[in-house]
Amino acid sequence: MTVRRVALLTAGGLAPCLSSAVGGLIERYTEIAPEVEILLYPDGYAGLLEGRGTLVTAEGRAQAGRLHAFGGSPIGNSRVKLTNVKNLVERGLVKEGDDPLKVAADQLVADGVDVLHTIGGDDTNTTAADLAAYLRTHDYDLTVVGLPKTIDNDVIPIRQSLGAWTAAEQGALFARNVLNETTSNPRMLIVHEVMGRHCGWLTAATAKAYHDQVRLDDLAGKFAPALGLDPRRFDVHGVYLPELEFDIDAEAERLTKLVDELGGVNLFVSEGAGVSTIVAELEASGAEVQRDPFGHVMIDKINPGAWFAKQMAGKIGAEKTMVQKSGYFSRSAAANPEDLRLIKSCTDLAVDSALRHEGGVIGHDEERGDVLRAIEFERIKGGKAFDTTVPWFVELMESIGQPIGAVAAAH
């Protein structure tokens, strides 16, 4: 069957790839199949359910390349789970008694769409999987091709999610300024909270990127230890991930010695570290734990970094504690050159797959020899754990003098 019209939507949280991926898809279609019409659904699945699609004009096609220089999403996002009927009814996106999957499928048919491109994380693509399965079992002649966006880099079985490299680089840039606050007070404790609900990859990669910067500047003679500008004080002193357990008392003892010597410590903490403990404490106290439409705990409401800082501050004798979050800064950035190359390879294959009516999520398949391919939707899952045995992480922990704890029970 000839592809006459394709549709694009971005969904979930932001990542430094959405704008570029939209631009890349438009450019690729314009390059190899200019006759194919391109429809954009604003605000993700919400725009699809409400039938708000708009066609890309010739002027829009000519401007597509400009999107590579921007973060965010030019067409807007939303968090929508097509199988969470109650939530969609409450939000006015479907009527009582409607099946959201059928509403979405019928809207695609009404709009003359042959291929739907979804750009998002594991929730977006598992929702795409639900939609693809519905289309297939109900004989709709539509293909869904997804692109993996998440700064957590936690989509199974995809080796590298779009935007994650940039987010780590931007988190290190954020830390570069924020950790100057270590000089603002004696016995300073700074907690840099990094995004990552289940996976510590981003926290580890951000800590490594920042640590490498400090070490490089130290080797280049940019610090001035004789004048108090000691690279050791500005470095990373602790990294805490959901995948690893740690002995808080043993860590407090190690960090106290550093505070005594250097005047402060800087900790990189994944927002997912300790969440299960915090949630258990809140629920035991009778407090309501808010969750999103996918059932995930709304981490920004429980503030894991502040909880972690409170636990540690008293134990190390901190005079002042500061918690800073790099998530929104990092995820809103434009893609860096490394991510741009990955995005282009994925968007090119996404178009090729779409023209063949080959559905799936585009990525390097870790379970198929890291080959870049359209991965079957039923194999896409979230919550991939970070491999804490990779050499670069082991080297990082050895370099900062922190023991690698045992693998956490949940992992």
Image (cartoon, rainbow, N blue to C red):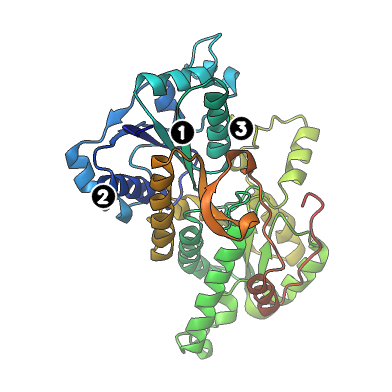
Up/down of 69 relative to 85, above or below:
below
Rendered residue at 50%/39% (across/down): 359
Which residue is nearer to you in this view: 68 or 321?
68
In the rendered image, the residue lying farthest to the front is 1
Up/down of 54 relative to 305, above or below:
above
Q: Is residue 302 visible?
A: no
In contact (CB < 8 Å): disc 1 and disc 2: no
Measure how far apart labels 2 and 3 are at the Cα level. Answer: 37 Å
- Amino acid carrying label 1: it is Thr
- Return the x and y of residue 409 as percentages of the image width and height: 82, 52
Which residue is nearer to you in this view: 112 or 260?
112
Q: Give the SS element for disc 2.
A: helix
Measure how far apart labels 1 and 2 are at the Cα level. Answer: 21 Å
Which residue is nearer to you in this view: 164 or 320?
164
- Amino acid carrying label 3: it is Phe
Marks 2, 3: nearer the viewer: 2
Reading the image, the residue beneath label 2 is: 31
Marks 3, 1: nearer the viewer: 1
Say the numbered circle drawn on residue 294.
3
Rendered residue at 46%/51% (across/down): 331
Reading the image, the residue beneath label 1 is: 143
